[in-house]
Amino acid sequence: DNESTDDGMVPYGKHMTAMALLSVLSSQLDKIVLFVFFGPVSLASFWVASVLPQEFGRFISLIVSTFFPRITKSNSDDGLKLTRKIFILISVVTVALSILYFMIAPFLFEMILPKYKEAALMSSVLMFAYTTIPYYSLWQYFISKKKIKKLYTINLIEPVLLFAGYIVLVPYWGMWGIIVALVIKSSLLNLFSVFYFIKYEN
C-alpha cells in the first residue's frame, strides 16, 4: 500500500536531525578553536593543510554509505557481519592511503604550494585523522537498525573527545595539539568499533 506509513519514522527523523547538529558542531570545533586562540593566519595554514585530507575523508565516507542499503536489508546478525568486513576493508585502504600520502605530500606541497611547504607534515598527519574512519561503517549499521541510544552515545562522545583533547593538548602544543586530538579521536572511535565486533563475536 503506497499510502501506508511507518509511524516510527518521524520521531526517528527528529533524533537523526539532533544528532546531525552534534556532528556539525564536532566538525567545526577545530576551526573555532584555531580562530579564537591563534587567529586567521593559523586558520589559513590549517585550512591549506587539511583541504585534501578532508576531501579524501568525505570520499571515504561516501564509499562507506554505498553499503547502507545492503546493511539495511540484512538482519541484525548478517548486517553486523557485513559491517565487520567493510570495517576491515576500509581500514586497510585508508591506512595504505595515509602512508602513500605521507610519502608524496612533501613533493606535492613543494610543487603546488611552495609558500606552505612547511604544512606538508601537518597535512600528512591530518590525512590519517580524516580518512581512517572505518568506524563510519559501524555507525551506518546503528543507523540502519535504529539503535538510537548507541547513536546518541557516539555522537556525544565525538565532540567530548575533541573538546577534552583540545583542553589538554592545545595549551602545550598549539596548533599541533588540535591535530593530535583529531588523531586520538579517530583512533579511539576505531578501537571502540573493534571492541564492539569482538563483543559480538563472543
Image (spheres, helix red, strand yellow):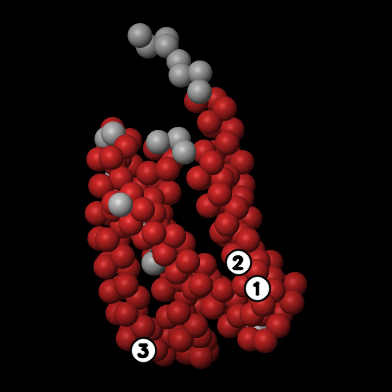
Q: CA distance from mark 1 to mark 3?
A: 30 Å
Q: Dot 1, how many residues are within 10 Å of its Cα: few (below 14), some (14-19), or many (20+)?
A: many
Going 32% across and 37% down the picture, which residue do you hit? 76
Q: Nearer the viewer, residue 12 or 55?
A: 12
The correct choice, above or below, for 32 with respect to 101 in the image is: above
- Residue at label 2? 162
Mark 3 or mark 2: which comes first in sequence? Answer: 3
Q: Are marks 2 and 1 in contact (CB under 8 Å)?
A: yes
Residue 41 marker: none
Q: Amino acid at mark 2?
A: Leu
The single residue placed furthest to the right in the displayed view is 36
Residue occupied by mark 3: 107
Disc 1 is placed on an element classified as helix
Estimate the spatial distance between the alpha carbons at disc 2 and disc 1, rounded to whole Å.
6 Å
Question: In front here: 112 or 131?
Answer: 131
Q: Is residue 152 visible?
A: yes
- Note whether 65 is above or below 75 in the view shown: below
Label 1 sits on what residue type?
A: Tyr
Name the residue that disc number 1 marks: 166
If you read the primary sequence from the N terminus, does the residue marked by circle 1 or circle 3 appear first?
3
x and y, in percent, of residue 43 in the image:
64, 75
The quarter of the displayed image where residue 166 is located: bottom right
Instruction: Let me know if residue 62 appears in the view.
Output: no
